[in-house]
Image: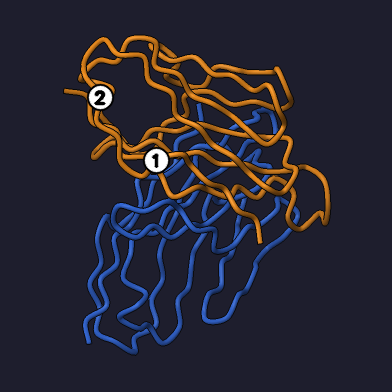
Chain colours: A orange, B blue
């Protein structure tokens, strides 16, 4: 089974702090994604990556950056946390290799509930 | 821009009923469509993935169908159980895009 893990389930930070959210997948997937989920706004893509050291902006990249130095790890960075970044953050991974029936099936981690005070 | 709509937003049924959840999308040039389940405060669990060349996929009591021409997918749940209570989301990936667009979900409650 694919396993996607996130470094924390719950995180409380103060305004202005630099915040790192880590995501690790164990299935050698090329693609990794960071989303945030907010009531009434659904899931929105922040950044995604197709390969090591590659990154592409999603729909709401402002205020965030990412790092992918190793294939299995994708980090989301909040350079200076703000209260409007309080949210549930979800990481996902997928692969375009393997059986065609499962091409690009996304697998999600358990989520990190971030509160910025 | 792809738009994905799930109606109804909430559904309550008695245990044992068969039910259908709907997902509509505006751009039929899709790469795949994926159904997920989400329990409160948790991540998303993949239920079924339908590639663009497929018409349906089945897993246990779940069956998902895809009709690209009409821009619709349905998730059929047979013999519903209280443990099926969750929010169900669909996600559509376009051929031209590397990312998926998610619907807002249907929150299902199955009453014992």
Quarter residue B28 falls in = top right
Image check: B94 left or right of A100? left
Residue of label 2: A13
x and y percent of residue B93 in the render?
60, 39
Judge by depth and name the residue closer to the eye, A18 or B107: A18
The quadrant the C terminus of chain B occupies is bottom left
Say which element carries label 2: strand
Query: What's the distance in space between the residues labelled 1 and 2, CA to CA?
Result: 12 Å
- Chain under label 1? A
Say which element carries label 1: loop
x and y percent of residue A13 in the render?
25, 24
Residue of label 1: A8
Quarter residue A41 falls in = top left
**Neighbourhood count class around disc 2 (C-alpha, 10 Å): few under 14, some 14–19, many 20 upward:** some
Name which of mark 1 and mark 2 comes first in the sequence. 1
Judge by depth and name the residue closer to the eye, A1 or B92: A1
Judge if badges 1 and 2 mark residues of a common chain: yes
Q: Residue at x 45, y 76 (%)?
A: B77
In the depicted structure, whether residue A29 falls above or below residue A75: below
Q: Residue at x 39, y 10 (%)?
A: A79
Outermost residue, left side? A117
Give yes or no for contact between labels 1 and 2 (Cβ–Cβ under 8 Å): no
- Chain under label 2? A
Q: Residue at x 50, y 26 (%)?
A: B1
Image check: A66 left or right of B77? right
Residue A57 badge: none
x and y percent of residue B46 in the render?
54, 58
Q: Residue at x 52, y 81 (%)?
A: B61
x and y percent of residue B78 in the render?
45, 83
Image check: A13 left or right of A98? left
């Amino acid at each position: 089974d694919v396993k996607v893990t996130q470094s924390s389930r719950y995180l409380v930070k103060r305004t202005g702090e630099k915040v790192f959210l880590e995501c690790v997948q164990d299935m050698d997937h090329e693609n990794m994604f960071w989303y945030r989920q907010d009531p009434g706004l659904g899931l929105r893509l922040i950044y995604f990556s197709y390969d090591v050291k590659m990154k592409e902006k999603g729909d709401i990249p402002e205020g965030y950056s990412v790092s992918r130095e190793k294939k299995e790890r994708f980090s989301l960075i909040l350079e200076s946390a703000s209260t409007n970044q309080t949210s549930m953050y979800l990481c996902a991974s997928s692969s375009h290799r393997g059986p065609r029936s499962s091409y690009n099936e996304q697998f999600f981690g358990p989520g990190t509930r971030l509160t910025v005070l | 821009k792809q738009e994905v709509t799930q109606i109804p937003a909430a559904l309550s049924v008695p245990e044992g009923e068969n039910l259908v959840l709907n997902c509509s999308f505006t751009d039929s040039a899709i790469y795949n469509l994926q159904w997920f389940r989400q329990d409160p405060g948790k991540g998303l669990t993949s239920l079924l993935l339908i590639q663009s060349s497929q018409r349906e996929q089945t897993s246990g009591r779940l069956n998902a169908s895809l009709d690209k021409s009409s821009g619709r997918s349905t998730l059929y749940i047979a013999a519903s159980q209280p443990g099926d209570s969750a929010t169900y989301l669909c996600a559509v990936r376009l051929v031209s895009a590397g990312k998926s667009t998610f619907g807002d979900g249907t929150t299902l409650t199955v009453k014992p």
